[in-house]
Amino acid sequence: MMKNNIWFAMGLCFMLALLFLASSCSGDDDDDSASLDDDSTDDDAGDDDAGDDDAGDDDTGDDDTADDDIVDDDTSDDDTSDDDTGDDDTADDDVGEFPFSIDFESYALGDLPSPWQVIEAGATTFEVMELALDKYSGHGLELSAGKLLADSGNAKYPLPAGVTGTIDVSFDVWMEANATFTFVIGSGSTEEYVPAAYIVVDSKVGKLYAYDYSTEPPTGTDCGAFPTETPMNIFVECDGNASTYSINVTGWPATCELQNLQTPGSAFVDINFGDGAGLAAGGISRFDNFAGDYGL
């Protein structure tokens, strides 16, 4: 009888030992090999657990430099909703991407919406239209210029305060024969507004001109031939540090390199399209895919 009691006691001790070991191993000690465990509540460098914050994992709720999660804000990722210097997302405002890109598709037909500032006099009008051209279609901006000296107008797209350094602007244009438009990157202030870069495209003579407003009177440079009734792309680069601007017409020999800016070092304040007031040219010009980059 005593022998049986001894065996029973030994068996009970053995079972208690097993239970102790089991309870010890089932808890998380947060000191397990990264390659062996994957516990939801620990914080091991090599695992991928929803509740931790490890540099090598890719969890939605953490904020690690090496991952690419929608809700974090890390410099080296490329997430739509963050605002990191090194990425290129449509919803942020990081240097190095186009701060504005307007294809007019979201604009209702008719008047230009805010933040555009439009001045129209006489028969000159600016209107968002349905375009059907070889290179692009959908909504675009149409300038219909009057033919009298009293007909004038411009459509300004304002820039944020303090834009200096380099500004690049690109846009598509189609113009009918005997039409004229101007393109200006403005600088200075409301009290002392001056064109930093000033371009005139005159289809009557089929030419693109760049003007240097640092001289009095301003001097014009013949940048070369410009076709009518053909969709073209114009790219303008202003370098406020070097006090110059350059023009390139994509796929066309019309170019102007290193034209002088009128006000070196001044902030750029707006970008505007005009009808060439005083030229009394008239005609229709259409614009699309207007985009720009600044503050580089």
Image (cartoon, rainbow, N blue to C red):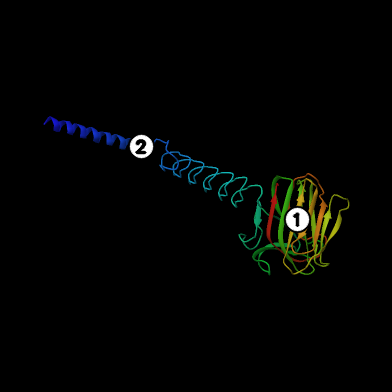
Q: Which mark is residue 236?
A: 1
**Residue of label 2:** 27
Which of labels 1 and 2 is toward the front? 2
Q: Residue placed farthest to the front in the image?
A: 3
Q: Nearer the viewer, residue 162 or 248?
A: 248
The amino acid sitting under disc 1 is: Val
Give the residue drawn at x 17%, y 31%.
6
User: In this image, 22 relative to 69: left or right?
Assistant: left
Q: Which mark is residue 285?
A: none
Which secondary structure lies at badge 1? strand
Which secondary structure lies at badge 2? loop
Q: Is residue 269 visible?
A: no
Q: Position of residue 245 (x, y in %)?
A: 79, 52
Q: Is residue 153 above or below residue 188?
A: below
The amino acid sitting under disc 2 is: Gly
Q: Is residue 210 above or below residue 67?
A: below
Q: Name the N-terminal-most of marks 1 and 2.
A: 2
Give the residue drawn at x 66%, y 53%.
100
